[in-house]
Image (spheres, rainbow, N blue to C red):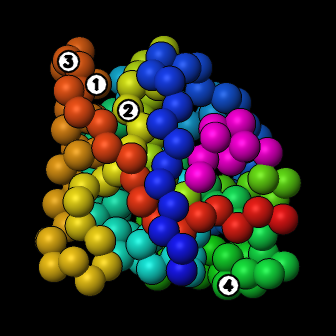
Amino acid sequence: MAMTESTMVALGSKAPNFHLEDVISNNYLSLDDIKSNKATVIMFICNHCPFVIHVNPELVKIANEYKNVGVSFVAISSNDVENYPEDAPDKMSIVAKVLKFPFPYLYDKRQEVAKAYDAACTPDFYVFDGDLKLFYRGRLDDSRPGNSVPLSGKDLRTAIDACLEGRKVEKQYPSMGCNIKWK
């Protein structure tokens, strides 16, 4: 597993639109269907990456907490499923149901959405404000598989809180994880 850092896209960038299949509901959803007028969290994840597996419990916890204050969440998997069949939509659906994802889990078959967002790794996090301008991009926290730092979600939580309160995030660290598996 090669560790890859996220691309630090310019803050203020407008969120690219998408129209992808949700493997949980089997409906196609767009950014307009998902966005919040407070904050929208877009996460690039997959099923097999040890970094994502490590953070999944905290992702579910954070999404469940913040959806109650109007923050929307969506996860997108863009991996090549021919070479990584464990990331196929049918397996994505199982993972989402087992982990009780409180957010849509979208499949980016053509990898166009990952490219539009300049996503580089899994997990990769983006927080957009109510106008869908990029407010934060980076990591969940400093916990990694095997580093003995407990999951807290502190960096993502700090970003969401700052976005909701109209404050700036002072420091943004890139996320780290497996590279997106490009075709």
User: Which residue in the protein does label 4 denote?
Assistant: 86
Q: Position of residue 26 (x, y in %)?
A: 73, 61
The N terminus: image quadrant: bottom right
Q: Residue at x 31, y 54 (%)?
A: 140
Q: Amino acid at mark 1?
A: Cys
Q: Residue at x 42, y 60 (%)?
A: 176
Between 87 and 89, the one nearer to me in the picture: 87
Q: CA distance from mark 3 to mark 2?
A: 12 Å
Q: Residue at x 76, y 63 (%)?
A: 182
Query: Residue 163 has which mark?
Result: 1
The C terminus: image quadrant: bottom right
User: Which is more N-terminal, label 4 or label 2?
Assistant: 4
Q: Amino acid at mark 3?
A: Arg
Q: CA distance from mark 2 to mark 4?
A: 29 Å
User: Which is more N-terminal, label 4 or label 3?
Assistant: 4
Which portion, as a residue range, is magenta? 112-120
Query: Residue 167 has which mark?
Result: 3
In this rendering, position of residue 167 left or right of residue 21? left
Label 3 crowd (10 A; few <14 / some 14-19 / many >=20): few
Query: Quadrant of residue 75 in the image?
Result: bottom right
Q: CA distance from mark 1 to mark 4?
A: 35 Å
User: Which residue in the protein does label 2 denote?
Assistant: 136
Q: Amino acid at mark 4?
A: Glu
Q: Is residue 81 visible?
A: yes
Q: Are marks 2 and 1 in contact (CB under 8 Å)?
A: yes
Q: Position of residue 124 (x, y in %)?
A: 48, 52
